[in-house]
Amino acid sequence: MPCVKPLLFVVLMVLPPLAASAAPATSQPEAYQAWPFNAKEAAKRQDETAKALGIPMEMTLDLADKVQMKFILIPAGRFMMGSTKQDMDLAHQLNVKYGNKEGIYDSEMPQHEVTLTKPFYMSIYHVTKAQFAAFVADANYKTGCEKGTETYVSQGKSKDASWKNPGFEQGDDHPVVCLNWFDADAFCKWMSKKTGRTIGLPMETQWEYACRAGVATMFLWGDDLGAGAGWCNIWDRTTQTKLPSRSGTPISWSDNYVFTSPVGKFKPNNFGLYDMIGNAEQWCADWWGKDYYKNCPKVDPPPSNDSSNGRNRRGASWSSKWPRIAFRQYFRPEVASDNFGMRVICTDVEPK
Ligand SMILES: [Ca+2]
């Protein structure tokens, strides 16, 4: 006669929590399970989580005189991360058609279940040039580009590029670019000290969960690449006309920006985050692991310890032709580019 009770106990121990319910203020809400979900449900979960913890859904942190950063609360939840075989087949077809390099897409598979049990705040926009300037002025910081660290510049036009002048015009409200991973990390450490909050780069799981915001399709707007007008600043017809590339672009619409755009000019996702796809790629905290998706645990997966390739970068940029949510890339942490930027998260959701 098999022993059932221990087995049942084990199952209960490994199952993620069920749906969140009304909880008294300051208690940790359980991770939401239903997936996918729409904008109304996303807002409901944000509101419920804020009320359960007795914290605001949006918060603003001061960085310097008249320089602030806005955050929005991302509730705990379950989602499907990565790409299906069907998505990958379509991505390969588009890739071959437009002559781009191949090789790392398979790392997006298998699509797998991830549950993040802790809510966090994410900056609504990229870190802007004005916000980075506040850091540089206060900490007397010099970026890798300014110190002569290896720099990769997308268009190869400005070997002396830095965040101050990436080789194209930028306003203070554009995403700061030409940052290597160490620069992005240094900004987070400075901001943590400045604000007394725990500021960091998002883990790749946090990034994709926040980016999808309930969306299970290839793109934020669905599965039709041609329906993305108004959603993101990428290598569109505008960029292709100004900087013609032999391989062309699969993007059929114009977003009216050749390079970076001011943050917040395109449609937000269901959580109210802007430019999660496009404008500037975003450094993540963790290493890119080729086989990471095959092996990572389902609940609060730890970062990959495979440092042989580079740090994760997510979210496409003005020079990307692929606005797929699941697209993963990496670069060595010392490399910067005029399309690498950042956004941050705050993981201590309750003020000290
Ligand atoms: Ca563009």
Image: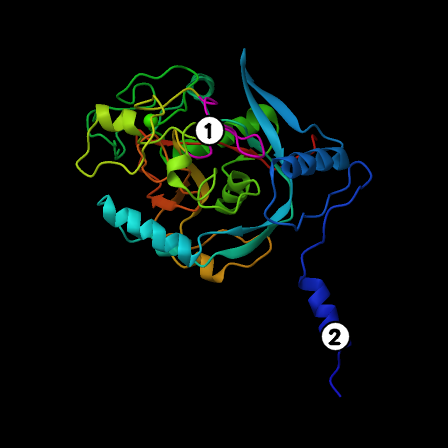
Residue 247: percent from the left, percent from the top? 20, 39
Segment tinted magenta in the rendering? 263-277
| Residue under numbered circle 2 | 6
| Residue under numbered circle 1 | 187
- Magenta segment, prevailing SS (helix, strand or loop): loop
Please state which of residues 248 and 110 is positioned toward the viewer in this rendering.
248
- Say which quarter of the image contains residue 141: top left
Q: Residue furthest bottom?
A: 1
Total of numbered circles in the picture? 2
Left or right: 15 as drawn, with respect to 243: right
Q: Can you tell me whether the CB of the residue at mark 1 lies under 8 Å from the nearest atom of ligand 1? A: no
Give the amino acid at mark 2: Pro
Whether residue 13 appears in magenta in the rendering, the answer is no
Q: Residue furthest top?
A: 66
Within 10 Å of the Cα at label 2, are there few (<14), some (14-19), or many (20+) other Cα atoms? few
Q: Work out whether residue 8 can be spotted.
A: yes
Between circles 1 and 2, the one closer to the viewer is 2
- Colour mode of the rendering: rainbow
